[in-house]
Image (cartoon, rainbow, N blue to C red):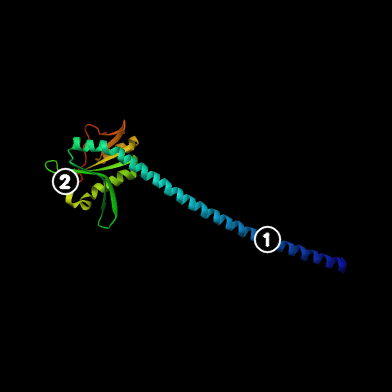
Amino acid sequence: MTDQELKDLVASLAINQQKMSEEAALSRQEAAISRQEVDRALKETDKAIKELSKQIGGIANKFGSFTEGLALPSMTKILSEQFGMTTINPSVRVRDKSGNEQEIDVLAYTNGDINTAIIVEVKSHLREEGIEQLLKQCRNFRVLFPELADKKLYGILAAVDASQQLQQKVLAQGLYFAKIHDEQFSLCVPKDFKPFCFTAH
C-alpha cells in the first residue's frame, strides 16, 4: 500500500468515524426527544386516568345514593311494621374516638318493651367487604352510639344484586338479608333464621 493510499484510507476512516459520531449524537438526541415525548404522554395518560377514576367514583357514589333512595321507602315500612321501629334515620354520619367518620345508611331504633336498634347497610352490588363493613358497624355500635348502647342490636344487609353464596354468608353471620323485587325491598330469610343480637352479651 502506498503512502497516498494509506493517507486516503486514514482520511476515509476519519470521515466515517466523524459521520458515525454525528449519527450517534443525532440518535441520542432523537432518543432524548422520544423519551421526553413518552414522559409527556405518560403524564397526560396518568392525568386522564385520574380524571376518569374521579368521574367513575362520582357515578358510583350517585348510583349508591340512588340505591339507598330506592331502598328507603320499603326499608322504612319493613323497619316500622315488622320490627316496631319508631325512629328511622337515613344516612347517619358519626365519628369514632379516633375522629374517623363513618356513614350508616339507615339507623332505626325504638324504646319501651322492644328497646331495639337496627343498622341497615344498602349495597347495589354486594361484595365480601359490604358484609365486613356491616359487621364492623354492629360490633362498634356501643362506642359509636353510647346513648343507644342499652338496646338490642341487629343488622340488615339490603342488596340489589347478590350471589347466592354471599346471601348465605350474610345469613350465617346472623344478619338479616333483604333483596329488591318489583322495586321493593323485602326480607329474604328462612323460617328457622336466628338473627345475631350484637349487644345481648
Please state which of residues 154 and 42 is positioned toward the viewer in this rendering. Answer: 42
Q: Residues within 10 Å of mark 2 (few under 14, many from 20)?
A: many
The mark found on residue 151 in the picture is 2
| Residue located 72% across and 61% down the image | 20
x and y, in percent, of residue 93 in the image: 27, 50
Q: Residue drawn at (52%, 53%), measured in percent from left and top?
A: 44
For the residue pair 166 and 92, the one nearer the viewer reads as: 92
In which quadrant is the N terminus drawn? bottom right
Q: How many marks?
A: 2
Instruction: Give the mark, 2 or 1, whose residue is nearer the N terminus.
Output: 1
Q: Position of residue 16 (x, y in %)?
A: 76, 62
Instruction: Please name the amino acid that badge 2 sits on.
Output: Lys
The three-letter amino acid code for the residue at tag 1 is Leu
Instruction: Please give left or right for residue 71 compared with residue 21 in the image.
Output: left
Q: Is residue 51 left or right of residue 111?
A: right
Element on which disc 2 rests: loop
Q: Identify which residue, 36 or 8, lies in the foreground.
A: 36
At 29% across and 55% down in the image, what residue appears?
Answer: 100
Residue 26 bears which disc, if any? 1
Position of residue 110 measured from the top left corner of the image (x, y, whole percent) = 16, 43
Q: Residue furthest top?
A: 182
**Residue 88 image-quadrant placement:** top left
Residue at point 30% right, 43% down? 131
In the image, residue 64 sits, relative to residue 99, either above or below, namely above
